[in-house]
Amino acid sequence: MLKKKPEVDIVNEVLEECIVAYPVSSFIISLYKQYGERGSLSKKQLQGLHSKASKIKDIAPGKLATLEAIINKMQTRDKDPLPQPKPLFQKEESTGQIIEEILAKYPQHKRVLFLKSKYDNNEVLSSSEMDDLKRFKQLLK
């Protein structure tokens, strides 16, 4: 990846000053290597660099302010909350009412009892089974 060649590279300058101040810090060394290879750092990495650099007494406050402005300019990626789980199958209330009406008059009706068990177990009733229920309801009247 080709890196742009700006006149002033604040991130590189802050990294070099941090390496002078903390020569054995593996964090700063890894940031310096990564910045040299990729030409950029993530927002979290820049925030860590800023916190390390703000502890150095001899660093120019303008460089820290510029680094902070770069951090604030970057986009924050927040994870969206997970959506509420939806039931796989939603019962139709009208089907349940038809079944209850038929069973109220004929509680031992085997076909309707079978369809009620399917309905209670959240199984999808086929169109022929729905037609049967409607036909049974019509016979009640």
Image (cartoon, rainbow, N blue to C red):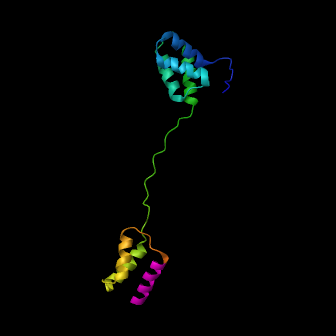
Image position of 137 with respect to 45: above or below: below
- Residue shown at 60%/22% (left/top)? 37
Q: Residue lying farthest left?
A: 107
In terms of secondary structure, what is the magenta stretch mainly? Answer: helix
Give residue 11's position: percent from left, percent from top.
Answer: 58, 20
Give residue 118's position: percent from left, percent from top.
Answer: 38, 72
Image position of 72 with respect to 86: above or below: above
Give residue 83's position: percent from left, percent from top.
Answer: 46, 51
46 horizontally vs 96: left or right = right
- Residue shown at 30%/83% (left/top)? 108
- Residue shown at 63%/18% (left/top)? 9
Give residue 50's position: percent from left, percent from top.
Answer: 50, 21
Image position of 88 with respect to 66: above or below: below
Q: Is residue 129 magenta?
A: yes
Residue 100 figure quarter: bottom left
Image position of 62 with respect to 78: above or below: above
Question: Which portion, as a residue range, is magenta?
Answer: 128-141
Residue 54 visible, this orientation: no
68 horizontally vs 95: left or right = right
